[in-house]
Amino acid sequence: MLVRLMYASRAVPTLDQDELHNILRQSKLNNPQHGITGLLCYSGGIFIQALEGGRSAVSRLYGRIAADPRHGDLILLNYEEIGERRFAGWSMGQVNMARLNPALLLKYSATATLDPYSVSGKASMALFDELVATASVMC
């Protein structure tokens, strides 16, 4: 059974670009062996991530993320059983925020800032779908 989980968290203030690259590098190395695919967005100290894979593998990974001291204020935005993956092409893709049109954020939010704490999980997932469709994702 495949599931998709989407969460948001706030990065610790000491998180820098090198640490962000380490997170992505580790995800790209570890996720394929566990059958996990997904997409990560990081902006303004906020992570939004969608994870897809088997229920047990995704649950274990979410548990590790919840225990990771680099994440705070962790919230579950969406969890669902799925028939197919949306992000099958990425062991972990990353949203290229430099290519993001602020109007896309305004489509789903009151402001042109990434703030999953003020929108629904459904709106966050719709935003991710559009990011993929507009090629705003780096591998």
Image (cartoon, rainbow, N blue to C red):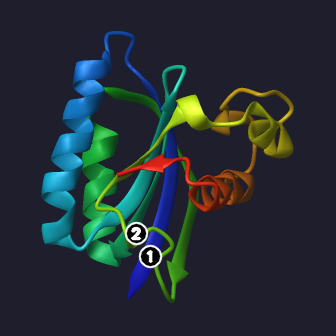
Say which quadrant the N terminus sits in.
bottom left
Choose between 67 and 114: the one closer to the eye.
114
Residue type at mark 1: give it: Val
Q: Residues within 10 Å of mark 1 (few under 14, many from 20)?
A: many
Secondary structure under badge 1?
strand
Does residue 29 appear to the left or right of 100 in the view shown?
left
Kindly identify the residue that appears in the image at 64 percent across and 55 percent down: 134
Q: How much space separates mark 1 and mark 2, taking CA atoms?
A: 6 Å
Sequence order check, earlier mark of 1 and 2: 1
Residue type at mark 2: give it: Glu
> Residue 16: which quarter of the image?
top left
Choose between 77 and 113: the one closer to the eye.
113
**Is disc 1 in contact with disc 2, using a CB cutoff of under 8 Å?**
yes
Confirm whether residue 109 shows in the render: yes
Q: Residue beneath label 1, please?
A: 3
> Residue 119: which quarter of the image?
top right
Q: Residue beneath label 2, please?
A: 52
